Image: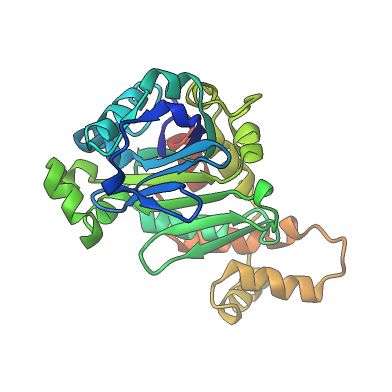
């Protein structure tokens, strides 16, 4: 079953009643906005001009059930927990049956013994650095983004240690309120694919429309599909003697960074050469230098982890 850690939906304003005006901010046009970041993200925007209501929330709205994430099985509980806040009353049945998803984060948690090593492997084995941009962030998150300017074509996959993330200071209130322990996510690696347009949602989830039930009932595997495109194919190229020495010198000169190697090779080879084939021995050398997960082929291991998504 497909699961999400964030949803933003739009629906009819009549599905939101009993609005506590003390909890909402009103703009000059009379539109209402409720927003909280603690203990979890929740935004409710009531736009009377359109007219339309936008509701955005994360999986943490599930409280103790947070590890289950947002899904067809838990969506009703999400709305019930929002109603329990007393800021307004959501017509749950109508929202489930008559809402459109504007953006979402498709999410899965998998077991991984060496998240850092896995991310290092991915960074060194991107199929095309012109098409995908890998980035290691200071907070420990590793992201891979499509190199596009159009929002409708944008996709971003974030990979991180879920135990480390839930233990951050900004999540302390949430942990204490719902009795969530970092150990609940021990050994868990989170893959989170952000889809920020309805076009991307339809394409990635293989659905004809972005109605909430269509999204929640999707049988597509967007994370594994994206990773299969991102990762270079396995290679078995062997090099010996002077070839090994030359590969080592190039890697040292490029600081063992495959993106630098690609840039160097593109400056030396004529346009039209098979860059994937040219880079293959450098990837192989980096992979042999890097750690492996359980001694298995790293690419196959990663795809095996997320095959259900």
Is the residue 172 above or below the residue 137 in the image? above
Which x, y percent locates residue 98? 51, 22
Residue at image location 48% in from the left, 56% down from the top: 28
Number of callouts? 0
Which x, y percent locates residue 129? 66, 61
Which x, y percent locates residue 279? 68, 62
Query: In which quarter of the view is residue 207 placed?
Result: top right
| Residue 294 visible from this viewpoint | no
Residue at image location 68% in from the left, 48% down from the top: 153
Is the residue 184 above or below the residue 276 in the image? above
Q: In terms of depth relative to the viewer, which is nearer, 239 or 251? A: 251
Q: With 13 as the anchor, is 68 left or right in this view? A: left
Q: With 81 as the anchor, is 237 left or right in this view? A: right
Which x, y percent locates residue 105? 47, 42
Q: In terms of depth relative to the viewer, which is nearer, 120 or 22? A: 22
Q: With 278 as the anchor, is 204 left or right in this view? A: left
């Amino acid at each position: 079953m497909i699961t999400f850690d964030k949803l933003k939906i739009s629906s009819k304003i009549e599905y939101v009643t009993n609005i506590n005006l003390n909890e909402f901010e009103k703009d000059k046009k009379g539109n209402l906005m409720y927003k909280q970041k603690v203990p979890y993200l929740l935004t409710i925007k009531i736009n009377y001009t359109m007219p339309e209501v936008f509701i955005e929330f994360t999986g943490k709205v599930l409280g103790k059930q947070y590890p289950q994430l947002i899904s067809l099985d838990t969506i009703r509980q999400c709305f019930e927990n929002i109603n329990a806040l007393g800021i307004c009353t959501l017509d749950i049945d109508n929202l489930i049956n008559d809402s459109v998803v504007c953006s979402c984060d498709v999410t899965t948690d998998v077991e991984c013994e060496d998240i850092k090593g896995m991310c290092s492997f991915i960074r060194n084995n991107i199929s095309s650095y012109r098409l995908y941009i890998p980035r290691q962030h200071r907070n420990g998150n590793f992201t891979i983004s499509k190199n596009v300017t159009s929002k409708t074509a944008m996709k971003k996959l974030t990979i991180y240690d879920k135990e480390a993330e839930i233990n951050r200071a900004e999540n302390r209130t949430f942990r204490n309120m719902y009795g969530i322990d970092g150990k609940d996510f021990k050994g868990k690696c989170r893959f989170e694919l952000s889809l920020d347009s309805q076009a991307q949602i339809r394409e990635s989830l293989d659905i004809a429309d972005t109605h909430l039930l269509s999204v929640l009932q999707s049988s597509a595997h967007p994370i594994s599909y994206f990773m299969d495109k991102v990762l270079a194919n396995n290679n078995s190229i062997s090099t010996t003697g002077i070839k090994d020495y030359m590969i080592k010198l190039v890697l040292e000169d490029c600081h063992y960074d495959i993106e630098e190697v690609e840039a160097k090779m593109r400056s030396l080879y004529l346009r039209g050469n098979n860059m994937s084939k040219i880079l293959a021995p450098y990837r192989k050398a980096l992979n042999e230098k890097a750690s492996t997960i359980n001694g298995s082929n790293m690419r196959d291991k990663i795809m095996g982890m997320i095959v259900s998504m």
